[in-house]
Amino acid sequence: MRLELSSTTVGYAGCAVLSDVSFVLEGGQIGCLLGPSGSGKTTLLRAVAGFEPLFRGEIRADSDLLSGRGIHLPPEQRRIGMVFQDHALLPHLTALENVRLGLFGRQPEAAKARAIEMLLLVGLADHAQRYPHQLSGGQQQRVALARALAPAPRMVLFDEPFASLDPELRSRLARDVRTVLKDTQTSSLLVTHSQAEAFAMADVIGLVGEGRLHQWDTATGLYQRPATRFVAAFVGEGVVLTGVGAGSGRVQCILGDVAVRDGTARAGVNVDLLVRPENVRILPGATLRGCVIERQFRGANCLCIMRLDDGTVVHASVNTADAPCEGEMVGLTLSGPVATVPQS
């Protein structure tokens, strides 16, 4: 299913939460709405599901108008499944019976066969007769996914589906769910505030905050080519440094001369650079010096945070075996290309 939002505004009690949101999710893609808590992600997801009316704009599924122009198709007519954060499984029903819930109207044997097929798809066929309290959190979420997929929806929506799980299980389950969705060629839209979750699952990500959609792009696009300062600050790590265009797509800043990714920096014009940890290199003998004020151990790599003489703080990703100690003075150099970000 191709999902298209055009100038969509959503909210509650007459107050807009997100305004003028437009994006296209192509059929078979996994999309994600990423942003801080309270940014309106779930409100927008509920509008797609049909639980919330629009203030303005349109929502279309393929050529069908779901919301807008005086039309509001109810949820049960949209053929869109939804997986909730709390799984919403009925405790007195087995896994098999929970999956069959979405198959009312089918002949009993056909419904049972479809439910077993879905449990097999998510790797829980041998847990069909267990009750929710006999399943782990990850297994309960798989049952919820099987139930959402059972009626063969055009799309599945996920509202913070892994929030209650521990980080290791979240990562593994996100990969497994992505595999199931891709195998079934099911379009889906996920809501999360976790960048790792969004990057692990989604083909395309919409970053929302400050009442609007800032950028609808791939994870690489968000990281390497942020469209706004909000995106630059929210995605990944790094600092914004001001430099001056030196011509030929290069900028001169406190860390030296560097190429910019878009190659458009004009000579003599101030440019804000997004300097990621991988852009900063510790180089013995370099003229520019910084003091290591903090080290963050991250397994094979270590994030070193350093302060220059003028107070500027930069980050560098260093092999843990070669990482300097806190308080040590080190030489620094800048390696590009780096991204530019809007100054306002």
Image: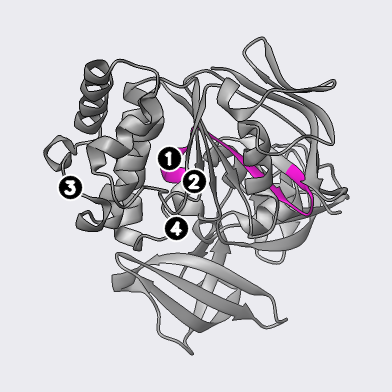
**Tag nearer the camera, 2 or 4:** 4
Report which quarter residue 105 is drawn in: top left
Instruction: Kindly report the distance in space between the C-alpha atoms of the residues bearing marks 1 and 3.
Output: 28 Å
Inspect the image, locate mark 4, and give the three-letter code of the amino acid beneath it: Ala
Within 10 angstroms of label 3, few (less than 14), some, or many (20 or more) residues?
some
Report which quarter residue 151 is drawn in: top left
Instruction: Kindly report the distance in space between the C-alpha atoms of the residues bearing marks 2 and 4.
Output: 12 Å
x and y, in percent, of residue 189 in the image: 53, 35
Q: Which disc is residue 130 wearing?
A: 3
Q: Looking at the image, do the residues carrying marks 2 and 1 touch, with CB atoms under 8 Å apart?
A: yes
Which circle's residue, 3 or 2, is located before the other in the chain? 3
**Residue at which label 2 appears:** 198
Q: Residue at x 46, y 52 (%)?
A: 85
Q: Is residue 153 magenta?
A: no
Q: Which residues are magenta?
A: 198-213
Inspect the image, locate mark 1, and give the three-letter code of the amino acid beneath it: Met
